[in-house]
Image (tube, grey):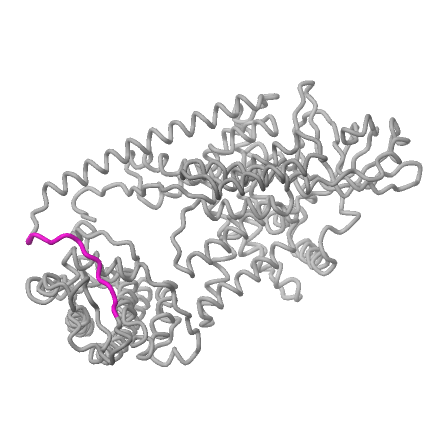
Amino acid sequence: MKKKGKKEPKIVKSHFELLPVFVALFIVGIIISEQFSSDLFIVWISISVAALSASFFLKTAKAQTISLLVAALFASMFYGTARFKPVSGYSDLLTLDNTSGTIYGRYTGESTIQKNNKILYSFKEVTYSIDNQTIDIPFKINCKTTINRQRLYPEQYYSLTGKMRIISFDTLPVFEVASFSVTQPKLPSIKTTFKELQTKIKDSLTSELKKEHSAIVTGFLLGDTSQISDKSIFIETGISHVLAISGQHIMIIILFTTAILHWFKIPPISRFVLTSLILTFYAMITVGSPSVWRALIMYLSVSITFLLESSSSPMKPVSIAAFFMLLHDPSLLHNASFILSFTAVLSIIFLSSPIKFLLSKIYLPESISRYLAVTFAANLGIMPMSAYIFGTVSLSSLFVNPLILWTFTFILPLGFIIAFLSIFSISTLLLNSGYSILLDSLIQFLEYVKGIPGLYFYVGNISSFTILCIYATLLFLISIFNKWQMKYVEALNHKHELDRIPETRLPKKKAIKIHIDKDSKATPTLLGKTALMDSTIKKQATAKIENPFQNTYIVEAIDDLISNLKRIKTNNSKDLEDVIPVNILNVDGQNLYYRLFSMDKDLFIKEPERLLQAHIFTLAIIGFELLNRINNNLEPPLSIDSINIDIKVNDKYLAIAILSDFIMASDLQPRVSNPQLKEIIKEGQALYLEAQNLLKQILDDKDFNGSIEKHLILREELVKWCWKFIKYDNISKLRKKKNLR
């Protein structure tokens, strides 16, 4: 991509993805199944099997696709019906109709606003106390009350007094609420061990912090808001989501955990496994709202995709999370926490890009515009849904969230540290004082915003059709923006094509292939379609252009080859750290290091294409560190505008290798004042020249065994040079910090 002058917008064309469509059909099927009797499950599965069978006999692709979509829809309707649990013992409760008593239960997050200004809250794990008797109710109960400013929180336990109304077998019991209060669960919702640990954390925070502070921190860390006396400042300022464990909490824990494991030199795959276990453990000690499981499943799917180097769009992890959660409990479709959590994520995916574009017009720095775009997108996206579910709108959330969310990068880790130390009776007096000041400042700011009139108001019972129209309008505006941006970028690319003056006329692209003659003992070679290697490629690789990375045709051929290679089994053995201590590399470099040094001579002979891949991996490892560190040591630093590379590749490691080669070929010496660094860069440039020559030799295929030996030596020399460069950069940074002090 050519970068010159004004920075061009980054556009990624979307492609049809089957997984999100399948999950959408799964959701639609569950919703439809709720409108019919549970006795029809045999009908749904019969239609699904018939549609699936018909797809094998249909001739056109369009007809087959429609048949498969019908099969998926009715299969999901069957599942939704099959998971419906008929109410047992309902007739025994008819005697409780019109009785007064007290209900203890957990709010599921499901709520419905009625036309008579009443709201129905759904509770489960319910016990009903009447006349000194306690009755367990094995199904959900709708609790009806007037809309008030004291909103209930999902997954919290409440005690409600009022009158029980049981009308018929077709509807759930309705409890008309006279008053309610927060209470502790009568029945544990999680295993005893986790429940005891959760209680111990609460007690330790209570012993270390003031009552109002410990209540808020318990909400931040565990999602338990039962001890917070006044939640209105969080509700009316639009940040009540910070009291529900969500993606923000999970992300902070991931960063904190990864940093510690990286410091202990834990290999990448092992880091992923340990981090996943820690996150699962954390999810178990929280109140277990759907948002925490959504964030956890998304992390697992994204991480696995990254480790497998599989191409993925943002919609795939979202779809996977929704599918598995609904597979476990289809009733989550009516859960407010589930709905708002996924609405926020989808809003970020679809709205952040247009908002970021608008913010860029006021010349904000890239990092700030990206941060504001994400927060604005999330808040703007959930505002209509929040109005529909709760009947309220908080305009202050649009500017409060961007201002206070960054503080949670301090509040959450410090809260965990205080809780951990206090469990082991370690004094945290000094830490507590500063922490209390931070919390007091946060509360005062929220109370000030809460006092501004007109930012929080009731909108009443909004129809679902109105909300549908709002989101349809947003999607329509997004589609217009995307079409305009695509046309703009295509026009820029067309202009660049006209401005480009090619050095040579290249032949029609022909992919480089690997050929091994199993019937002979000849050395494996890189072959063209009909000859040892296309003669035109040979000339371009060896004569016309000294550096193959500067030849579009050759680079695209390499990209085609290595992009289609399957991932090899990685060896995370400590023996691989004999060359350099792996933990000095960044995360991308560490993953690549283990893959590179898992390739040996036997693998190259068995799969000759791996030699070319290993060579690219070597340069990419150096490239990751160069891109992160080189400008810290140059005066003036390299400018992005100076990078002029007109080659597009799919493999990210090849892209990094090309960038690192470009940097090393730049005139770096005049930008360096330190003699030691001059020698390091001079040595690196010499090694890169050897790498160019080796690449030409690999492509030329004259001495395959000799290329293997040279690669094994050169990759170790390059990685050791990288270690030398990193050590110099680290020492240089320490000196700068010391001088500043």
The spot of residue 366 in percent (x, y) is: 31, 44
Can you name the residue that lies furthest to the right here? 131
Q: Front-most of 60 and 450?
A: 60
Which quadrant of the figure has residue 692? bottom left
Main SS of the magenta part reads loop
Is residue 732 visible from the viewing direction of this image?
A: no
Q: Residue at x 61, y 46 (%)?
A: 327
Q: Quadrant of the C terminus?
A: bottom left
Which quadrant of the figure has residue 671? bottom left
Which portion, as a residue range, is magenta? 503-515
Left or right of 61 in this view: 696: left
The spot of residue 333 in percent (x, y) is: 61, 37
Q: Is residue 279 above or below residue 709?
A: above
Q: Is residue 137 above or below residue 95?
A: below
The spot of residue 594 in percent (x, y) is: 38, 71
Magenta segment: does it hold 320?
A: no
Is residue 465 visible from the viewing direction of this image?
A: yes
